[in-house]
Image (spheres, helix red, strand yellow):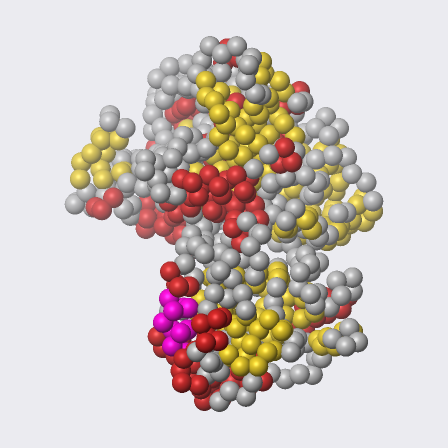
Amino acid sequence: MKLLLFLMFIKFQFALPFLIYYGNEIPEYKLYKYDDLVIDPDQYQNVWEFSNQTYAYISMGEVEKFRSYYNLLLKKGILEAVNPEWPDARYVSLKNDIWKNYLLETIIPNVLEKGYKGIFLDTLDSLLVSKQNRKLIIELINSIKARYPKLKLMANRGFSLLKDLNVDSVLLESTLSHYDFKTKKHSLAFNEVIKVPSKIKIFSLDYWPRSDHKTIKLLYQKAIKKGYIPLISTIDLQQEPILLYDFERKLYFNSVKVDFENKPIIRNILAISSVDEYDRSAIHIHMESTLNYYGMHCFNKPFNDLPKELHSYDGVLLWLKGDDLEDPFKLFYLLSKAKSLGLPIFWIGGFPPIPKNYPKEIKLNKLIWEAFNIKVGPYYFFKNINAKISYSHPDFHFEKKLSKTKLDSIQAYDIKIDSLKEPILTISIPKFKDTTPCFFSDWGVFLDSSKAFLAGSEYQSRWYMNPFTIIEKVFYKEHWPIPDTTTIKGKRISYIHIDGDGVLSLSEISAGKSCGQVAIKKIFKKYKLKTGVSFIANEIDDNFQGNAISQQVVSDTFALPYIEPASHTYSHPFSWKKGIVAFSIDKNATDTLWDGIIKAKQEVGGILNLDFEIKKSIEYLSQFLPKGKKLDVIYYSGDCVPTKQQLIYLKTNNILAFNGGDSYFDHNFNSLSYVKALGKDIDGYKQIYSSNANENTYTDLWNDRFWGFARVKETWDNTGYPKRLKPMNMYYHFYSLAKLGSYRALIYLYDYLYKNQKNIAIIYPSQFIKIAHNFYTIKIKKISPKHFKISNATDLKEIRFNKKIKIKSTKNIIKVTYNKKLNVTYLTIGDSPQAEIILK
């Protein structure tokens, strides 16, 4: 049967979209999303930029009158009888190799010049109907592969020929159902047996009335069971696609929105930035913690390493900062593909600069206009503009209000009216057309970054726009359960951990005593709070800097029942990536400086000796453990920026680790943008951050304001209300016991935790690390708008709804806590890693 249009979305291992389309009205960007794409090369004559598998439609057994070569072949005498089902087409003869040679030497080379990577071999059955010689048919098809071995070939039917054909895939049309053209009735045909060689990929197409969802689902199940990549469509193949109802994504096509009851919880965000090191990107520094609040986390991809597929992501976040892109078309090709798949897009930063003499500039602008309905407008102004700024809603104001005196520049944008779902910010300039540099669209949000975020100097960055409001309108449109890393049984988490630096330093608090000795007497034994304490092995080992006093400090500390032991490595690496350490056991290590001041060593090849720094330090410190305790935790040292290989090492050896991030929210760092993420992803491996910055950063790197660590209480307050963003983490070094001011800061913080311990959940650092790791692996599935299933909740046991809820029933939920002040509901999961929630 002639195929005019069909679309297919199917969850088959992962989403495998498949399209055959012979028209020319679908914009190119909407075609990018299909893994396998069959289109007419006369309609789409340049597909070089398509990254998917493109097949050019070629009718093998007949030629239509509208083809440019029809009259030529008619004169050559190889077009025979008219196909009675398609009067505008004639059967083609294989005599004298005329058709074969024309295919190989003219039609296919023309197709390749247009950028196609494959051929869709239609009407193979017509060659059999017209009684062409079987041997010649096989020779015709196989000659294509022989001449063009890299060309992918997809056969439509031709089942009796398949075992002799050198093709890559086959389309099984009407093999699970049958349509009677005379009676116009459908019937099932599950008993048909088709033998397809195992090397051939199988697509299938069947027809069924779109209103009969039950049978459509049955047909899909049958096809999937047989190993097909199926499509169920209507007989005319010219209507909107029929989609599986258990497909886990919201899809859009030609402005038709398809909602599924079983849409996924949005959690995995593709974060696109200009830097290879994600911890330096604006997304990670200023925004990921807000995404974490909604249970989302980012997978970083720099401009030069964009993913080829989008199956693993639930949304896209792009932050452009005036970056020079080598090939901006490649970036917006991916974004348009995401849009056509229905992935919500958060685009902040405006348009990228166009490279000089960029050959794709016209095509790029066309793509952005067709996909996102926006283009650079007719004017651009610098400072001192008589402009009026209007917000559509006061909720969009946040930490700082944008005023005309703060406008560095104004770039006008042209936006299609039907795409402008809701303006956020409008700027009016006398005698010029109003411009809307921030707006919501059907695909997500566009924010001109200078109008949404103030990227100030140190301490001065602020959000003009409310990122919570924006995220809720783009990614978190419904209330679903959120995995929460800040709370246990409704109580806010608090944890204390100490880096081993300074354990040998003398203290001003008690004359002649080391900081380690003072910590035991004045802190640990006084407050008796759960605390993680680490030591640097070389400061304990008497083969290096250690002595009997430091060894006694370790023994006495680890003996306390409320102390969790940890290692702060053996030598205290300064740079994990460059292999710069405080000292090295390798004689070939070279002298260097850390931070331009501190004398250090660099390991050979810049590679840390992980067995020494991690395994040996744990083995050495473990000799001081009392019976029943185990040491399997590392606190990162120095820059706290481990590499992927180092994260793999830790995971392989079942060693927990954390530190880094440096999160603030106080009167100096008075912005949400300084609250850092839970951790970061490096190609699937996670580094977990400590929840707050330590005293070193509050004291000008331990040079001044030694009392400054008391200000971490401001961060605790600001990250606890109006939204609970972080646990309360007291993170310091032993050298905080060296100065009277820093000691008093510790006492102030300890007194607060001690007095409030009944209202908070004080846990060990290792428990928080496990909770944080589980944040990335816990599964939350939406069965219906009010029905949710949770699995793999091994360590993270708190789920949050950002509102007051009414519960119909639950499974394995042991506690429900409504926090009126925060207006959130916490649900605590029991011992089993599975749970279920049904709301009224």
Residue 632 pos. (x, y %): 45, 48
Q: Could you say which is closer to the camera, residue 193 or residue 241?
A: 241
Please provide the residue range marked out in magenta: 100-109
Please check the rendered image and state whether residue 53 is part of the magenta-colored stretch, yes or no: no
Q: Quadrant of residue 488?
A: top right
In the depicted structure, whether residue 53 falls above or below residue 632 = below
Q: Quadrant of residue 597?
A: top left
In the depicted structure, whether residue 645 falls above or below residue 446 = below
Give the tally of numbered discs.
Answer: 0
Task: Tell me which residue sits at (60%, 38%) in the image.
Answer: 444
Task: Tell me which residue sits at (28%, 41%) in the image.
Answer: 579
Which quadrant is the C terminus positioned in? top right
Residue 95 pos. (x, y %): 44, 85
Task: Left or right? Give the position of 474 relative to 35.
Answer: right
Q: Quadrant of residue 608?
A: top left
Residue at the front extreme, as displayed: 75
Q: Could you say which is closer to the camera, residue 45 or residue 16?
A: 45
Q: Main secondary structure of the magenta part?
A: helix
Residue 352 pos. (x, y %): 42, 34
Residue 506 pos. (x, y %): 34, 22
Task: Tell me which residue sits at (28%, 40%) in the image.
Answer: 578
Q: Could you say which is closer to the camera, residue 560 or residue 23?
A: 23
Task: Left or right? Give the position of 337 relative to 645.
Answer: right
